[in-house]
Amino acid sequence: MSSSKASTSSHDDLVPSSPSSSEESQRQHVANKRKENTTCIQKYNRQWEEVPEFKGWLESSKKGITYGHCNVCNKDFVCGKSEIMKHSKGAKHLKLCKTIVGKQTIITDMPSLQQKKLLEVKTKSAEMWFAAFAAEHNIAFTAFDHLSQVIRESFTDSEIAKNFSANRTKVTAIITNVLGSYSFENTVKLLQSNYFSLIVDESTDRGTIKSLAMVARVFDKNDVNDIFLGLLPVPNGTAEGLYTSITDFFATCSIDYKKNLIGFASDGVSTMMGIHNSLSTKLKADIPDLILMKCAQ
């Protein structure tokens, strides 16, 4: 009986006891550590920069050889193609990429837009030169209905000639609204600061509407110039009506005629040059030293 117990005791000593839970967790921790230490760390590969999804924004990082850098998001990340792909599909990255592409498109198109704008400016300049030539030399506006085609056919190697377009309607508008307005503004400034003489003549057009033509004689750029001021509608052909139209014109243009007007000339009709209650006597009352010049009969 005793020998049987001894045998059983001896057998129990040979069988290993089951490990405790703390020992098992320690073993698992050591195994995980060994697995981490044996994990392969990828270095940055410059060939990734040629991948279509990564091209243009992926570059090496200053943080180390195991990091990549996104120059769009200005962000570093651990190397690995899967990690880079994950970053490329991020909402923030995609939004910033769209913004960059839009800016690049604008920058790329800018030279062509500038060239187009420059061509438009040069073409408009050419059209204004032709319009000014027509006004200066009294060329009929109807001639411009054929001039544009002549210019395009004559100068086939010129981009300005290809875009040149100036028919009589356009030329009339350029002279009236652009050149005429610019010239009138310069004339007003000239009369505001210089002495001048006024030459007038009353006329009636086909519609029996009376108008007063006004020309200013002024010294400018070392020369005496006669400048057409305009045609004033005259509802009242009396001396008082003419005087009111002229003085209202000077007031509208802020021209101090009482200071700068030194001479007045017109034909010899009584309304203009009569010794009693005429336009000249009314102007003479405002300007005692005004020089009067009557046209020869």
Image (cartoon, rainbow, N blue to C red):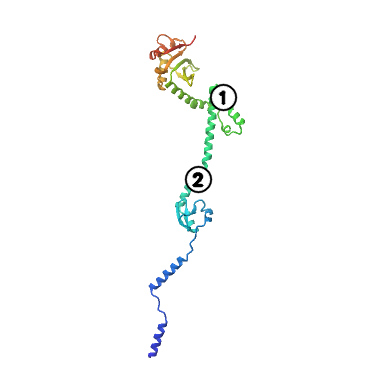
Name which residue type carries label 1.
Thr
Tag shown at residue 31: none
Residue 188 drawn at (x, y percent): 44, 22
| Quarter-of-image position of residue 119 | top right
Name which residue type carries label 2.
Gln
Q: How crowded is mark 2: few (under 14 residues within 10 Å), some or many (20 or more)?
A: few
Q: Mark 1 points at which residue?
A: 142
Residue 26 drawn at (x, y percent): 40, 71
Which residue is depicted at the point 48% across and 45% down?
A: 103
| CB-based contact (under 8 Å), mark 1 and mark 2 | no
Question: The residue tagged with tag 2: helix, strand or loop?
Answer: helix
Q: Name the residue under label 2.
A: 104
Q: How crowded is mark 1: few (under 14 residues within 10 Å), some or many (20 or more)?
A: few
Q: Nearer the viewer, residue 205 or 187?
A: 187
As measured in the structure, the alpha-carbon distance from the residue carrying label 1 to the one carrying label 2 is 48 Å
* Image vertical order of residue 297 relative to residue 191, above or below: above
Closer to the camera: disc 1 or disc 2? Answer: 2
Q: Which of marks 1 and 2 is nearer the N terminus?
A: 2
Viewport quadrant of the N terminus: bottom left
Question: The residue tagged with tag 1: helix, strand or loop?
Answer: helix
Residue 46 drawn at (x, y percent): 52, 55
* Image vertical order of residue 142 relative to residue 74, above or below: above
Which residue is depicted at the point 39% across and 73% down?
A: 23
Which residue is depicted at the point 40% across and 85% down?
A: 10
